[in-house]
Image (cartoon, coloured by chain):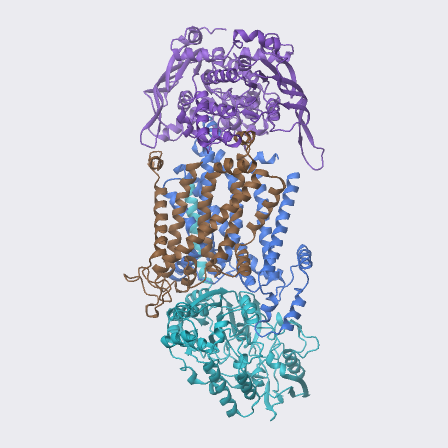
Chain colours: A brown, B blue, C cyan, D purple
Amino acid sequence: MEHLRWLRKDGKWRINFMIGAGLFLLAALLSVIGCFYTPYDPNEMNSAMKNAAPSFQHLFGTDSFGRDVFSRVLKGSRTTFLVGLAVVSIGAVGGTLVGAFTGYFGGKLDLILMRVNDALAAIPSILLALVFVGAFGSGTLQLVLALGLLFIPSFARVVRSGFLVQKEYDYVKNARLMGAGQLRIMFVHILPNTKGSLLSALAIGFNNAVLSEAAMSYLSLGVQPPEPSLGRMLSEAQPYLIRAPWSAIAPGMMILVCVLGVGLMSIEGGEKHD
Amino acid sequence: MRYWVKKTAALLVTLLVAAFLTFLAFEVIPSDAAMTKLGLDATEEEIQALREQLGLNRPLPLRYLSFLADAVRGDFGNSTQYGRSVGELLGGRMPVTLGLAFYSFFLIVAVSLPLGILSARKHGSHGNGGFALLTQLMMAVPPFFLGMILTLVFGIIFKVFTPGAYVPAGEDFFGFLGFMLFPALSVAIPKIGMTVRFLQNSLNEQLTADYVRTAKSKGCNRRRVLWGHVLRNALVPVVTFLSMVMAEILAGSIVIEQVFNLSGVGRLLAVSISHRDYPVVRAIILYATTVVILLNYLSDIACRMLDPRIRQI
Amino acid sequence: MKKHAVLVALLLSLTALCACNGGKTGKNGSDSRSAVVGITQDLDSLDPHKAVAAGTDEVLFNVFEGLVKPSVDGTLVPAVAEDVEIAPDGMSYTFTLREGVKFHNGADVTAEDVVYSIKRCAGLLSDPDPEVKVSSALSVISAVEKKNAGTVVITLKEANTELLGFLTVAIIPENYTEQSTKPVGTGPYRFVSYEPLTSFVVERFPEYYGETPYLEKVTFKICASNDAAFMELLAGTIDIFPYLTEEQASQLTDEYKLEVGASNLVQAMFLNNEFAPFTKPEVRQALCMAVDKQEILNIVAGGKGNIIGSNMFPNFGVYYNKDMETYYTYQPEKAKELLAKAGYNESNPLTFTMKVPSNYDFHVATAQVLVEQYKKIGVEVKLQLIEWPTWLTDVYRGRDYEATIVGLDAALAPSDVVRRYRSDASGNFVNYKSDAYDALFDKAKASVSNEEKITYYKQLQEMLTKDAASVYLQDPAKLVAVNKRFTGYRFYPVYVLDMASIRPEK
Amino acid sequence: MTKDATKGKNSKVLLSVRDLCISFPRPDRSNKMVVDHVSFTLSEGEILGVAGESGSGKSMTALAVMGLLPENAKYEASELSFLGQSLLFSNRKKEEEVRCRLSGSEMAMIFQEPLTSLNPVQTIGTQMEEPLLLHAGQAKEARRELILEALASAGLRNPSELLNQYPHQLSGGMRQRVMIAMALINGPKLLIADEPTTALDVVIEQEIVELIRTLAKERQLSVIFISHNLNVLQKLCDRLIVMKDGKIVEEGSTEQVFSTPVQDYTKKLMSAVVSGPKERAKENAEKETKESTETEAVLRMEELSVIFRKKTSMFHAPLYKTAVNKVSLSVGRGEIFGIVGESGCGKSTLLKTIAGLQKASDGTLSVSQTEAGVQMVFQDPYTSLNPAKKVGWILEEPLRLHTKLTKQERKERVLSMLAETELLPEIAGRHISELSGGQRQRVAIAAALILNPELVLLDEPVSALDVTVQAQILALLLRLQREHGLTYVFVSHDMAVVRKLCDTVMVMKDGRMIECGPAEQVFLNPKEDYTKKLIGSAKESGK
């Protein structure tokens, strides 16, 4: 099993990668379960059981509306991770396109696009998110589009630097001699060689996407209630931090577990391909 | 010399593009300052009268040009929300946000540099070991969640600092340091993880370079190799990275100021956006963009000083 | 390398050290004659005539006074004016001014000041400042003249016996331009300083004509959010905090005592009567029956607050029609039948979107409870959080909504509460059209005799409830935390934070 | 110039190494043995040569002596002593203490890559001063004198000017001289040189070897000189060791090893050195000279020049650099046309222009175009093939672009091409990173020829390869050219290879054609003195 061999490096098991993979699988498993089964209906309220402490009945206790925190975390992580995935893929696809063209062709196109990139990076993310929400109404889709747009500059920069280096290599000249078209050279020949840096950028991108979904919901721009998202649950739980900390700690931990898992995997992942 | 001219031109273009994007943003966001100002039972004529006074009815290009003209003169007009000059408003807020930004930047540099160097020497590649786990953990914590926990633990339970009692640096510097430690930490901790990892990768890369072998062949011991040769080479990419981190700190301060009830520029921005106080918002955006651009300049100068090869362009 | 580890440890301990002592000095002095009041909404203007938000009026109440001012029991007491005489036909009001009333800048209050102030609010000044909020109720004034040094007469275009409730607008010095930066009024407290997003500080006005208040200095501390303010409450840097949620009230430390009163708001799910399903009264009635109001109170406010049945809250005393509260009781089955009659059932469920202003957690929480309760009778409700300014333009002005939840306050005049449902009223964002209602409303407004007014207003409330113009929920409880050092906090029927009544706890 | 072998015997033993083994851990807990029981001794004033191909462990042995092995390397030996002092230590702290005392004062080392061996961010002066600060500690003024004297002794003109310059401002040759000056500044007893001249041009290589020989003689310096270039070793060293797969296969005095090599590996090594004229198949030798003019010219070029416009700044006039200056030539079908010259003479630019990758500024260029057009084989095997793709895919790419063959037909065509270039079929499933340098170049050649192009341009295809592999690739190129009647334009800085392969040769300097004619005529009686100098230094260093 060639992959198993890779798990050992310099005579030591890659512990961190395995911890990371374990955490990520745990988070992914929970959110997948969330799609089909939750012990209680995540939105079902029960005023008698407000802010109940964690018990067998309610693994993570209940929140200020008497809703089961464990079910909400399951459903919420599904929403948050889907948003994370969607945002990071928009960012990656958009970033790759922008990065490829600016890196490969350079010249005026490079100058203009890079300036727009810097401008986008300088503008605070909540303003742009607001523009989207203002223009298209608030909701998960608008949030995904807004954040996706914001993630394009960072990916573009990674891909562009990759292309700047690769396009000087002889195999690109060879490809041109063989009559391959510009687009084919860019996306069939050069792109696979930037896979290493793109992969680690994807991992970091996913983490930032999950964290910014949480921040956006904190400023009540993201997912609309009563639909649970980890960020929304955190912001709703803040006033009850002292009396019912579990309703804040549970979503917080879920974010931590997933982001830490992806982070640990990204260290090794990056190395594998460079 | 030519390099600097080109650099300034590029940065000015970024500034203009940022200003235009902000301007466009406000055209798209529905509702306007006049209606928000006059509230529920304002009549139609009153709203039009106020729009007239605030010059909101002028055609779009005209407004944009007048905005640019004012900005150049440093006059950002009056806030529709508070009726006071934007400059005065920002002036009051600036020390809080800048204090937070520089304090967390100081923490980041003071903590991650020694940690990065320490770990590079001991652990070799970043991959394994508890150290990598620690840095990843730091990067994984959502800042405002950290802020909440810090306030709860240190503010309420251990009463190390009193939440909300912002002590301006002017009055009592140590009080300021004491209070701001926790907001600064919640901004800094995720960034410390990133910087340590970045510094470690850069150091490890340099440690395998040929000139390190030459240095050892000259008789340098591990310490002299690290401090005399490798560190300076490794710092060049780190400086650019740190200028990027500083830009992120400024953006991140919006949420942290909310959690710690600091009335800084970040919170003013959040409030102004929700009140459609356009003059304040565009001033803050320009301020933020200029700060980011200045940082680019500084990191460029630092890079040129550190690495003679760049000087040559 | 050891050296560096030591360096880092030293550095961290140094910062932690100064954290301990630094933090402490933050606590304000314990001299008892000053107090810090926590508020969560920043003042939108220091000029009383330009202030719009209720959160600003309640603070400026301490600095400004009108000809008359509201009292605790809902009546209007003389302030700058010593006495008022309303003409029998309700067409003119004559005010005799109080002797020796001084402005904070030391100048005496003259008739010219009064005329200027009233004209400014009624929009009768020659070159009106567009930022001044012209109250529509005062638009009925045709002229304001100075009869002699001590009396001012206000004549109306049409009869209105309830104008007095609106004449609490602030009296300010004539042509004083710096009202929005250095406000001057006649109230018990004088302006000291204002730092946007941070604090608004006032001090006792020695030459106040009335009883001088106990507190010498009051700081209104503007907090980022309700939670941030609560953290400060727990840390003891705030003495009085009037926006406590039920949850926070249960965690109060023993340094504070809890005062419970009414917010004087009508919180309801306002239905856009022109939106297709809501044009049918039985659908609206079904929505009223499907709501378990007590359950809402239990979840959102721990059971506190008063359930209301129509568009008025209890503090209006005699005018309030109490038995509307129990007109609709929780009958989900009956609600389903009504909906079925109107053509809505499992196969064709009633669905609508509820727009809720995102900055009011209380309304957002109520909305979520409603969504669940309506789900029980097969009604699907989608929530959409929007920003306050967007709510103003889209919902209030544009009437582009299906349903919304908000709390509406009112001046101390019964007509002001129900004025909104008159078909041509500018604030009728509910699009409620009923000729019978309009006729009855006009009669009530113009009637001179009090008994007649009471019966008419009760009938108006009954009409609204029967017709289910909106789903009326509650007048939320107002929970106020007051430091044990003080006592004497009093609740008013209007949005007011009266600091003059605070006394030390003996 | 034979060395007197006796001198080595009676002088004191400086360094003795016995049963040295070096290994690296592999993921599956086993260890990869890189150096296997190597033993040798070095006496004072003796120059020991270490020959062997890449991967033979010669560099690892040198690094072990200097204590510069990478972190994860494990080494042990029964004896490793220098001037009586044992270099084997139990704990790391003692090892570092002794190593720091010896390195740079008693023993020193210079490396192969001059570009990266100097610290890019420090001035030459600071880097030169460091060994003095570490070991001697004279006064500032005395140190400055020592540095200037060391730089001068290394043959650098006006050294004072060099002090505050940075490494990137110097040429490769100058940097190697600085390395030598820095190594010898403290008058060490032992100098280890790990392939110091491999990356340099022939002319400069000659000067550096000469410099090392004179310095060694003047200072009674004992030297370990590692190289895969046997001619350099033959000229410089007293004694010779030949290494293969981590073991010493042959040892002896230089003449003995060269005149009567014992091991057949050494013989194979000797014979692989390219020298002598091109073997002409009898029958086409005459044909060649007679009718080369009538055969139809595949490539014709008149007064072709390529000028690069370098914009310095908006205010000054732009700088112009003429890379190729009015070159005219014509290449007939089936001919191998060689272009030779030092690096920077414009030969690569000319090649790129012919391939169409570079636009010519003026002059005419006509290439007889067939469907496959012109193909090219580059020097660096690592970057000339797409690392992310499998070999099969790379070879199929030209077929996908130009032919209508089905997937199956393409597969067959690729397999036949691999066989043609003597590569095993399962290579198709492997990535470039898993192949050796020689195999990669064969794949590159296969990729170039798969569409059987009219004209193949070869840009220094063998100069990055080991000697034995070099010989095989040249033989392959010749065979393919004969079988397919291909036309080559072969560019190189290696005179011997050009002579061995090409029919006609053109010598270039600073973008201009110096001399052009049939290979043997140019080599036996060159007209221009620059050509003489080139051929002379080539013979001198045995190229």
The foreground one among D537 and C193 is: D537
Q: Is residue D109 left or right of residue A251?
A: right
On screen, B86 above or below A89?
Answer: below
Corner quadrant of residue D277: top right
The foreground one among D71 and B178 is: D71
The foreground one among C342 and D313 is: C342
Residue B164 in picture, x, y percent from top left: 47, 63
Corner quadrant of residue D493: top right
On screen, C364 above or below B310?
Answer: below
Residue D246 in picture, x, y percent from top left: 37, 20
Q: Is residue C397 left or right of residue A236?
A: right
Q: Residue at x 53, y 30 (%)?
A: D402
Find the residue positioned furthest to the left.
A56
Corner quadrant of residue A172: top right
- Asked whether the viewer can see residue B1, the reply is no
Residue D386 in picture, x, y percent from top left: 49, 31
On screen, A10 above or below C333?
Answer: above
Number of marks:
0
On screen, D285 above or below D84?
Answer: above
Residue C431 in picture, x, y percent from top left: 54, 76
- Asked whether the viewer can see residue D536, the reply is yes
